[in-house]
Amino acid sequence: MGRPTNEWTFTHMNRLFPSEVVSRVGPAVPLPTGRERLNVLYNYGGSVFDLAQFHRRTYTTAFVVLHRGRLVHESYPGAFAGPRTRFQLFSLTKSLTSMLIGIALSDGLVTATAEPVTRYLPALRGTSYDGVTIGHLLDMTSGVGDLEDWTDPDSDINRFSNALFTGRPLIDVVSSAKRTAQPGTRFNYSTLDAQVLGWVLEAATGSTLARWASARIWSRIGAEHDGYFWLTREDSPSALGGGSFNATARDLARLGLLMAHDGVLGDQQIVPREWVARSRGSAAAHLAVGALGASGLDHYGYANQWWTLGGERRSFTGIGIHGQYLYVDPVADVVVVKCSAWPTEDDEALDYETIAAIQATIRYLEIPQLEAVGAVRRAVAGAHRRGHRGGPATGGDRDHEG
């Protein structure tokens, strides 16, 4: 599915599926603005590109940047995109679900991440999820399911997707997934794990995902617009904890701002501080950057339904298929939202280039422009000398209208 079909689809999911509103309830609180030209250059594959080229090359539909809590840049290259447009965020939903689990733990509705999921979901007793804990689900180490391969028609993710479109009960797909590793021993990215996590949250809170998200986050962050979850076509429709949330790019940036500021907004501790810390990286060796195996690219680790970047900065990002990003750098106090309409679900090259451009944008905001120009020139020269293919730890600055 290519443009413009996928761009229309990713901004009109409530026309295609039943949906449930995530109400903002209270008054909108505008983001402080401090708009500026982002003359960002980044290096990828030994060549230098600006942000306008980045958006064309990586199918950007929305790009929003917050620095120190201020909206410094936004652009909407997508055909159907704008500040009021609600974007389908796919697996970025997983990161929101994690935030909601952390709040439920703080409220005492979920008592510990070490609890077995069958305490909340008895229907999973006797399945491969019997013996799996909430913590295993959060870190994608349940040991259940195969490689999430969209090109294999028989993969668990494609069986899951087919069930969504046909109205087959998702519990049937989840219950039939096979055990492929002992829980807690191996990372395997799994939308099935996130779906179970969403069901756990609904069972623990006695609320739908949409109502819980509205009550505990969306009504408290000054969101400008309602969000929504689209729902399954089952007899009893439900939201996807791993993939059906839709929101504007600005309001998504507000979620990132919460995570950049240790879960605090104003004088409110909305997401527990320790939950934010848990999301920035795990001490488990099999979740470290570069150790995820076939389920992850070598510049990522994983923790708490977030992809982690490691290093002293401990930046982290939510990611959805077709190029959805919520990148959080608490050290620089920068949040970057990129919504996209990639023609395929996953694309390693587009991911590398996206991380390179985002990190270059962050460096541009952190360091004086002249120093940044020198840095990118040195990086490019070094890349040519080494025959460097490009990657996520490169970048610089220059040439795009904010």
Image (cartoon, grey):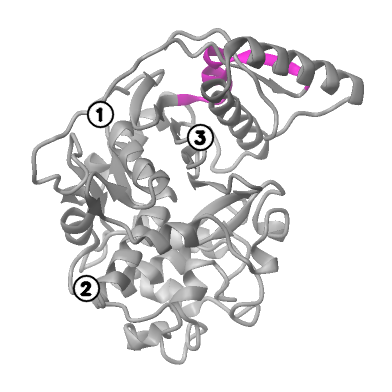
Residue 31's label in the rendered image is 1
Left or right: residue 33 versus residue 151 is: left
Task: Give the mark nearest the N terminus, 2 or 1.
Answer: 1
Task: Give the mark nearest the N terminus, 3 or 2.
Answer: 2
Give residue 333's quadrant in the image: top left
Left or right: residue 8 versus residue 40 is: left
Residue type indicated by callout 3: Ala
The crowding category of the residue bearing disc 2, from other C-alpha atoms within 10 Å (few below 14, some 14 to 19, many at least 20), is: some
Q: Mark 3 and mark 1: span between their CA atoms?
A: 18 Å
Magenta residue check for 322: no
Above-or-below relation of 229 to 282: above
Magenta residue check for 52: yes
Answer whether labels 3 and 2 touch (C-beta < 8 Å): no
Q: Position of residue 314 (x, y in %)?
A: 58, 49
The crowding category of the residue bearing disc 1, from other C-alpha atoms within 10 Å (few below 14, some 14 to 19, many at least 20), is: some
Q: Secondary structure at mark 3?
A: loop
Residue range highlighted in magenta: 46-60
Q: Position of residue 169 (x, y in %)?
A: 33, 70
Q: Nearer the viewer, mark 3 or mark 1?
A: 3
Q: Secondary structure at mark 2?
A: helix
Q: Which residue is mark 3?
A: 332
Q: Mark 2 and mark 1: span between their CA atoms?
A: 31 Å
Q: Nearer the viewer, mark 2 or mark 1?
A: 1
Residue type indicated by callout 1: Leu
Residue type indicated by callout 2: Thr
**Which corner quadrant holds the C terminus?**
top left
Residue 205's label in the rendered image is 2
Extreme left residue here?
26
At 69% across and 67% down in the image, what residue appears? 286
Q: Secondary structure at mark 1?
A: loop
Above-or-below relation of 134 to 54: below
